[in-house]
Image (tube, grey):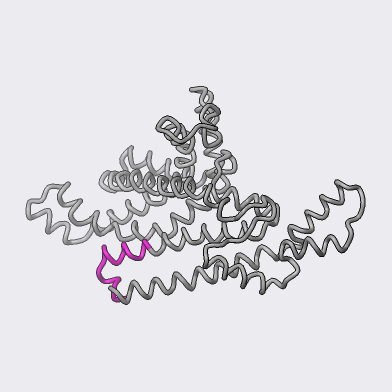
Amino acid sequence: MKYYLLRRFFYTVILLFAVSAFSFFLIDLPPGDYLTSYVASLRDARGSEIDQAEIEGLKQQYGLDQSLLVRYGKWMRNMLNGNFGRSFAWNREVSDLIHERLWITLLTAVLTLVVTYAVAIPIGIYSATRQYSIGDYFFTIIGFMGLAMPTFFLALVLMYYINRATGFSVGGLYSPEYMNQPMNTAKFIDMLKHISILVIAVGMAGTASVIRIMRSGILDELQKPYVIAARSKGLTEIQLLLRYPVRLALNPIVSTIGWILPSIVSGATVTAIVMNIPTIGALLYEALLAQDTYVAAASIMLLSFMTVVGMFISDLLLAVVDPRIRFT
């Protein structure tokens, strides 16, 4: 088990290093940079050309006079020391910008993950034990709708009907009356009301997928001879179901953490922009538009880190659930 964990941890570190290089160089691929846009805006504001000496001074100020490899090396060295650089567009430390949005990003991701499995596993068990019933068909239709419908569109539909039925606007992170107040119980509850639509919309696709995986896994296990033998020993259907088929069907469910967490993060990016919720995904979108290299690279690194951690947790849980995996 120790060597398995060390090997998985080593793979995680290598993957994060590769992602850091890929994200930093990818952001630099489009023509121009932040300075190009900034100089163009200065030219429009002044109505005249910008002196070349001033442009060179701005390049030195933003560190854009150095090669891409040098800038990447400095960024990596500083990042390992907890310094993500300084934002061009916001003129603030990148770590401050991320810190402001990190907690809401983690909260929505964890809540979505919990809701996904809390809803999907019982429904998957129900559908498997009542195959081809009205309830099974109903949840199958809901599952296909969840897989087919874009998360941002579902969020817009829910926002519209909730506002129409209750008059409550779920856009943004807080209601106007709580905007400038310190955090308290009422403000926290108001925040949960606002992010609940984000959690439901983003978790819908993952819930639909887990339902189908759980259903097919239990149906496969119910056809095996050990189920007939256990039933002949006098076990009730509930005892039989929870003791054997459900436990074995959880293996593929645990492995889904590795891809559901990335889908939650990616799906929440566009949906958070639509709902005006300040997550790291929304910050990444704004940084890419402004070609703010350090903000964009740090945001991608953090989102990738969450994804890799999800895969690592999935591997650990699989090793706990199935001892055979520890020796692979």
* Residue 177 highlighted magenta (yes or no): no
Front residue of this view, candidates 274 and 292: 292
Residue 160, image x, y percentages = 55, 29
Residue 267, image x, y percentages = 52, 49
Front residue of this view, candidates 213 and 130: 213
- In which quadrant of the rendered image does the N terminus lie? bottom left
Prevailing SS of the magenta stretch = helix
- In which quadrant of the rendered image does the C terminus lie? bottom left
- The residue range painted magenta reads 313-328
Residue 78, image x, y percentages = 57, 67
Q: Residue furthest right?
A: 48
Residue at 63%, 70% in the rendered image = 72
Residue at 32%, 44% in the rendered image = 123
Q: Residue furthest left?
A: 233
Q: State left or right for residue 173 relative to residue 46.
A: left
Q: State left or right for residue 30 relative to residue 222.
A: right
Residue 238, image x, y percentages = 17, 46
* Residue 323 highlighted magenta (yes or no): yes
Q: Is residue 300 above or below residue 264?
A: below
Residue at 45%, 50% in the rendered image = 106
